[in-house]
Image (spheres, grey):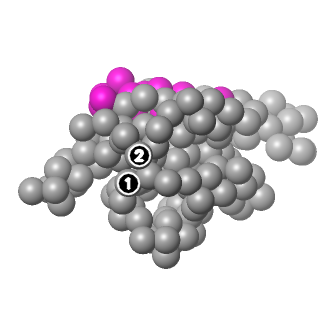
Amino acid sequence: MKILIVVSSEHRENTLKIAEAMSEAAPATVTDLENVDKYNLQEYDIVGFGSGIYYGKHSKKLIKLALNATYGDYCFVFCTSGSKKFDAYNAKFAKMLENRGKTVLGSFGCLGLDKFFIFALFGGLNKTHPDIDDFEAAQQFICKTMHKYLEIKK
């Protein structure tokens, strides 16, 4: 099984850290948006898309890639956010992918350091995140995602 994880981690690298944790538990390659063109997405069984949340949404560039690139039928979404609304953020993104005929195997979200605007004056929100518990949860998520894929492919 081959997994590609595409990340847009623009400010604090929170999302990149989560993707790297996933890759420690799965046969996954991690790339950022700037280097994704070096990979043939069609060669991967599963493609994951993750970013920080900006104004209530995943990265616009990441969404554009996920909706327009040519890749297999299976994907997952994930995010890091200053708020705990990741399920809602991921659900919107997953719905867009499902409307394009993709099978979304799952979604993952966790808190990330947020130094947006006024929060920067106080050192930010969620200063310790992502933390070891977040990394372990991400690893459990990717294992469940692989298992779900294998069950579907039986």
Give the residue drawn at x 24%, y 37%. 1
Is residue 15 or residue 127 the one in the foreground?
Answer: 15
Q: Find disc 2 in the rendering and name its residue.
A: 42
Disc number placed over residue 101 in the picture, else none: none
Gap between marks 2 and 1 measured at Cα: 6 Å
Kind of element beneath mark 2: helix
| 20 part of magenta stretch | yes
Give the residue drawn at x 72%, y 55%. 60
Disc number placed over residue 72 in the picture, else none: 1
Q: Amino acid at mark 1?
A: Gly
* Residue at the bottom extreme, as displayed: 99
Kind of element beneath mark 1: loop
**Main secondary structure of the magenta stretch:** helix
Q: Can you say whether 20 is above or below 126 in the image?
A: above
- Determine which quarter of the picture holds residue 51: top right
Give the residue drawn at x 41%, y 65%. 102
| Residue 44 seen in the current view | yes
Is residue 24 or residue 99 the one in the foreground?
Answer: 99
Q: Position of residue 14 (x, y in %)?
A: 61, 33
- Determine which quarter of the picture holds residue 72: bottom left
Q: Position of residue 30 (x, y in %)?
A: 49, 30
Q: Amino acid at mark 2?
A: Gln
Q: Position of residue 128 (x, y in %)?
A: 60, 29
User: How many residues crowd around disc 2 within 10 Å: few (fewer than 14), some, or many (20 or more)?
Assistant: few
